[in-house]
């Protein structure tokens, strides 16, 4: 059983999967809803602005969200967050492959929509984080 | 009339698992009809590294992974009628083809091998002309020399190679999905303006091009998204019908998983606008795509739409960009984070005094590295709150000034004796660096063509 005080934020990792891809200095992160019921909650809270703020230390110059309701997914495109990309970055992860999990660290407000999505998570996956 | 084409993936990148193709070939061999095995082994930089190798030795310049990938499956493919398509030709497809011919001969075969050329823009456009076509930056401006300039060409040349009767098609730079679209156009005779069909074939290629990334690789998150027997993950096979509908599966007895989640994640991998994924063959629109699980490890994908192909071709231009210097040292036990912080401060002070022009990045592995930034914003926040007991510091800089880079490496090594207490495990690396820029180039500068190996000899 998962127990949450109604005011405690919920980690995005509980409601979505994510995969990062790169092209040059541009990162995309596909975010896939674990259950269809998560779609409205994520559409409401995981906005392009919220993602831009979450990635602020990497100084995105533009963040766009593309919505794919037929796939239960969203695609985020973050410009200039790879510090030059795989061929120029001084960092260890020039591809930004690990940054999907940076996205999944985003905290959601425990709104009605979020609670509804949490209720229908498959039991085996209802891990408590 | 053929109604079904099977395409298996043998590799999704140059460093991929080399025996992964063996079960794929075994499964393809159990079926009749047109069957192909594709290898994608060219990252952006691979080609530039191969170009440098070719300059040193004209018989080199193909992917160093070629033999490792091809040798385990060459005989079984040739004896079962499975045709091989790979971009492992890199900067020298002809030499790669000759190498494969020699491998085949040693195994008692004499296959027909086609070579696809014409992606290189070297000599067709000056550096200044390329600079004028750069997108998303100005890295090429004022540059004197480049290492390589190669356009991502489309599927037509692969189709032509297969039309010539090739058992094996060797390419250099080519759009990754074209490795699958080429054979589909060869079998189904799709025209180059049947946009929805080209989109379906491109989507098949996009889903296959990264190997296991669609069948359970790059996916597992224990307790959240589990993948059975990931240690023996099976590489994907696509079954594509004449109308473009495709089913993804993998060889029986292999590990991994194919379901709507693995497929959707890979469908959006490296995609920007899902309504307009630009390839040389077609603009792919995924917004109406459907993904259905139709059986265990069987997923049907349909609904890809296509729009007229772009006028220009994406071109990757690589150039030498000095060296990357990296040095690491570790601190552990009580007060480790504070000792690491002091060490970082010492290096910053010393480098500011001796090589102020050099931008030095500091990571604290275990505290802030992957999510860190070169300016150190994240690291500063993390270190202040850290109670870490095991921290590995990493310093990095890139420059054409080798003296400054060596100074950084020496300063980090010196921390053994002049730094904080208990610093251990110094490692230092200096790596030559190739950087790349993207250009959009008119199609008229490329001349993609397929020729059979013996004709060219």
Image: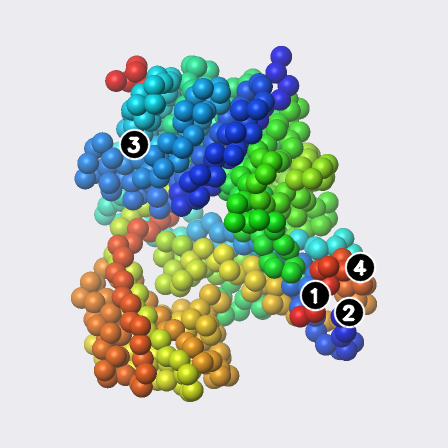
Q: Which residue is mark 2?
A: A1
Q: How many marks?
A: 4
Which image quadrant: the C terminus of chain B? top left
**Residue sitting at x 57%, y 49%:** B229
Where residue B8 appears, x then y in whole percent?
53, 32
Q: Is residue B12 visible?
A: yes
**Residue sitting at x 21%, y 63%:** B401
Q: Nearer the viewer, residue B381 or B142?
A: B381
Q: Chain of mark 3?
A: B
Q: Secondary structure at mark 2?
A: loop
Q: Which residue is mark 1?
A: A127
Q: Are marks 2 and 1 on the same chain?
A: yes
Q: CA distance from mark 3 to mark 4?
A: 55 Å
Q: Which mark is residue A120?
A: 4
Q: Chain of mark 2?
A: A
Q: Is residue B91 visible?
A: no
Horizontal relation, residue A20 to residue A119: left or right: left
Q: Which mark is residue B278?
A: none
Q: Nearer the viewer, mark 4 or mark 1?
A: 1
Q: Quadrant of residue B395?
A: bottom left
Q: Which residue is mark 3?
A: B92
């Amino acid at each position: 059983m998962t127990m949450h005080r109604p005011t405690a934020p919920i980690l995005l990792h509980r409601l979505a999967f994510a995969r990062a891809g790169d092209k040059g200095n541009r990162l995309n992160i596909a975010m896939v809803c674990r259950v269809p019921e998560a779609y409205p909650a994520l559409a409401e809270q995981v906005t392009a602005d919220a993602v831009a703020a979450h990635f602020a230390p990497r100084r995105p110059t533009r963040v766009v969200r593309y919505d794919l309701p037929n796939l239960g997914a969203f695609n985020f495109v973050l410009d200039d967050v790879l510090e030059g990309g795989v061929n120029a970055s001084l960092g260890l992860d020039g591809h930004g492959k690990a940054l999907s999990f940076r996205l999944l660290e985003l905290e959601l407000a425990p709104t009605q929509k979020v609670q509804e999505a949490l209720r229908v998570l498959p039991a085996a996956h209802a891990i408590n984080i | 009339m053929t109604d079904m084409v099977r395409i298996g993936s043998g590799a999704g990148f140059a460093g991929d698992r080399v025996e992964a193709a063996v079960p794929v070939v075994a499964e393809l061999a159990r079926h009749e009809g047109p069957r192909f095995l594709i290898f994608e082994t060219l990252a952006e930089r691979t080609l530039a590294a191969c170009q440098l190798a070719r300059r040193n030795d004209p018989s080199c310049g193909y992917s160093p992974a070629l033999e490792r990938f091809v040798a385990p499956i060459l005989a079984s493919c040739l004896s079962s009628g499975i045709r091989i398509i790979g971009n492992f030709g890199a900067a020298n497809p002809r030499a790669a083809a000759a190498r494969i011919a020699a491998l085949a001969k040693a195994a008692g075969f004499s296959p027909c091998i086609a070579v696809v050329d014409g992606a290189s823009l070297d000599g067709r456009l000056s550096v200044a002309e390329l600079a004028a076509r750069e997108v998303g930056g100005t890295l090429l401006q004022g540059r004197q020399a480049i290492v390589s300039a190669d356009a991502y060409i489309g599927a037509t040349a692969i189709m032509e190679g297969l039309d010539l009767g090739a058992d094996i098609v060797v390419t250099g730079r080519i759009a990754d999905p074209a490795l699958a679209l080429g054979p589909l156009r060869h079998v189904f005779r799709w025209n180059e303006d049947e946009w929805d069909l080209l989109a379906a074939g491109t989507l098949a290629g996009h889903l296959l091009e990264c190997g296991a990334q669609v069948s359970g690789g790059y996916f597992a998150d224990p307790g959240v998204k589990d993948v059975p027997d990931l240690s023996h993950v099976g590489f994907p096979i696509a079954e594509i019908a004449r109308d473009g509908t495709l089913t993804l599966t993998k060889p029986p007895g292999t590990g991994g998983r194919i379901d709507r989640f693995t497929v959707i994640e890979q469908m959006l991998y490296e995609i920007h606008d899902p309504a307009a994924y630009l390839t040389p063959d077609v603009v792919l629109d995924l917004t109406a795509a459907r993904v259905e699980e139709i059986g265990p490890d069987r997923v049907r994908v349909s609904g890809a739409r296509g729009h007229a192909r772009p006028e220009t071709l994406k071109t990757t231009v690589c150039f030498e960009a000095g060296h990357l210097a990296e040095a690491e040292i570790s601190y552990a036990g009580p007060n480790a984070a504070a000792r690491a912080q002091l060490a970082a401060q010492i290096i910053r002070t010393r480098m500011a005094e001796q090589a102020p022009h050099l931008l030095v990045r500091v990571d604290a592995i275990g505290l802030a590295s992957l999510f860190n930034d070169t300016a150190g914003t994240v690291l500063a926040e993390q270190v202040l709150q850290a109670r870490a007991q095991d921290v590995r510091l990493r310093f990095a800089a890139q420059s054409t000034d080798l003296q400054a880079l060596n100074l950084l490496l020496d300063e980090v090594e010196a921390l053994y004796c002049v730094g904080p207490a208990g610093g251990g495990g110094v490692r230092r690396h200096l790596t030559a660096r190739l950087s790349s820029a993207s250009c959009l180039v008119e199609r008229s500068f490329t001349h993609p063509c397929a020729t059979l190996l013996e004709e060219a000899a």
